[in-house]
Amino acid sequence: MKTAANVLYFLAYRNAYKSFLQLEEADEPQPSSLYNSVNALRKDRIVFEERDNTNDTDDKNLPVYDMILIAGSGYQLNQLEKRINFARQHLSANGVILFDFANPQTRQDDKRCGSAWQLVARLRCAKSGFVCVLADVGQGCAVYRPSLSSIAFAAKHLTQFDDFDYLVANRNLLLNLMTTDTFLTLLRYF
């Protein structure tokens, strides 16, 4: 698996997922090729910023989804946290949330990718959910399954973990970095 589309395809196939939601940015007028390649019985797209202008009852009327993709890069931590919280509310019991750009390799990548890797480190501190980053998929595809318990590496996220140099020195620990082969092996137990 080399792309997020491959990951979504395999998760849908392996878990018999039938519904997919893509949270995207307002500057994406056309569906992405990723959205078009997902094979699901029900597929929806939501421009997250436009959703902020609606009332809460519209959000409550949304169905639940098996897979939710947070599309885009360059998010600040608070933006990603809002999207993750929204996704958790609309996720089926065994569903997964995916977001990309979680494994920046250089400082330039870090600026372009945003705070996705920092969010992964924070999610790893919560023992109530499993999260990993697939290192060999693009800039790092994060797979988050809130309903699956995980052993965390720390009781809380410390601010020094947000430094890029700390990421470079502790990448595997912070991101639960794994190859797709390891992920496919673990997927049997998901």
Image: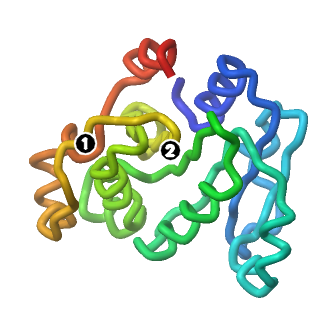
Mark 2 surroundings: few (<14), some (14-19) or many (≥20) residues within 10 A: many
User: Nearest the camera: 80 or 32?
Assistant: 80
Check the image and name the residue furthest to the bottom: 53
User: Nearest the camera: 80 or 85?
Assistant: 85
Mark 1 belongs to which amino acid?
Ala
Q: Please name the residue shown 70% across and 55% down the image.
A: 90
In the rendered structure, the answer to whether residue 179 lies left or right of residue 49 reads left
Mark 2 belongs to which amino acid?
Pro
Q: x%, y% of residue 23?
A: 69, 60
Q: Which quadrant of the view contains residue 180?
A: top left
Mark 1 surroundings: few (<14), some (14-19) or many (≥20) residues within 10 A: many
Q: x%, y% of residue 190?
A: 51, 22
User: Nearest the camera: 126 or 44?
Assistant: 126
Does 9 appear above or below 116?
A: above
Q: x%, y% of residue 103?
A: 34, 48
Secondary structure type for disc 1: loop
Q: Which quadrant of the view contains residue 89?
A: bottom right
Q: Earlier in the sequence, mark 1 or mark 2?
A: 2
Check the image and name the residue furthest to the right: 41
Q: Please name the residue shown 32% across and 63% down the image.
A: 110
Does 5 appear above or below 61?
A: above
Question: What separation in Å lies between label 1 and label 2 (alpha carbons)?
Answer: 13 Å
Q: x%, y% of residue 178?
A: 33, 28
Tell me, yes or no, whether the two marked residues, 1 and 2, touch with CB atoms within 8 Å: no
Residue that label 2 marks: 146
In the rendered structure, the answer to whether residue 163 lies left or right of residue 64 reads left
In the rendered structure, the answer to whether residue 184 lies left or right of residue 90 reads left
Does 98 appear above or below 116?
A: above
Q: Please name the residue shown 19% across and 43% down the image.
A: 153
Residue that label 1 marks: 152
